[in-house]
Image (cartoon, rainbow, N blue to C red):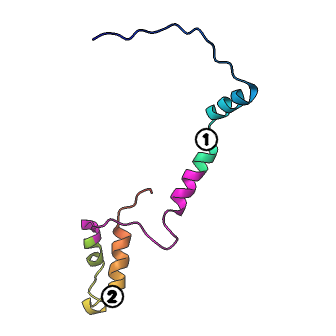
């Protein structure tokens, strides 16, 4: 393999004021760290609307057991509603950060 020949630099690139300003501005970050952090936190906060919950696609074992854990002798099986099962499953869903 033959190495390419490199020629020495004989010309210097001279920028006028407008070009220097453009190069300088391209090196600046578009947003400050505080602005990026604020946007990230706002995205996490607004990711799940109020009154909604993020739950697994498939229920966990704990979620499936939850509706049956609080059935006592006074509560008839027929009096348990789908809504109460659902609420128990949501309460047992794993909690994690968005």
Q: Quadrant of residue 62?
A: bottom left
- Residue 97 vertical placement versus 71 (above, below): above
Mark 1 lies on residue = 33
Identify which residue is drawn at 63% across, 41% down.
Answer: 30
The quadrant of the picture occupied by the C terminus is: bottom left
Q: Quadrant of residue 15?
A: top right
- Residue 46 vertical placement versus 11 (above, below): below
What are the residue bounds of the magenta stretch? Answer: 39-63
Residue 9 x/y as whole percent: 55, 10
Q: Which label is found at residue 81?
A: 2
Q: CA distance from mark 2 to mark 1?
A: 50 Å
Q: Report the mark closest to the observer, 2 or 1.
A: 1
Identify which residue is drawn at 52% across, 71% down.
Answer: 50
- Residue 9 magenta-drawn? no
Circle 1 — which element? helix
The quadrant of the picture occupied by the N terminus is: top left
Circle 2 — which element? loop
- Residue 66 vertical placement versus 38 (above, below): below
- The total of numbered circles placed on residues is 2
Please rate how many residues cluster around mark 1, counting C-alpha atoms within 10 Å: few if below 14, some from 14 to 19, many from 20.
few
Q: Nearer the viewer, residue 11 or 48?
A: 11
Residue 31 x/y as whole percent: 63, 43
Lower position in the chain sequence, tag 2 or tag 1: 1
Q: Nearer the viewer, residue 54 or 71?
A: 54
């Amino acid at each position: 393999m033959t190495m390419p020949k490199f020629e020495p630099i004989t010309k210097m690139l001279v920028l006028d004021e407008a070009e220097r300003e453009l190069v300088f501005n391209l090196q600046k970050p578009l947003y400050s760290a505080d602005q990026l952090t604020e946007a990230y936190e706002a995205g996490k906060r607004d990711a799940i609307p109020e009154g909604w919950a993020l739950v697994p696609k498939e229920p966990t074992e704990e979620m499936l057991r939850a509706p049956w854990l609080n059935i006592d002798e006074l509560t008839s099986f027929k009096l348990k509603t789908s809504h109460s099962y659902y609420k128990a499953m949501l309460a047992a869903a794993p909690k994690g950060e968005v």
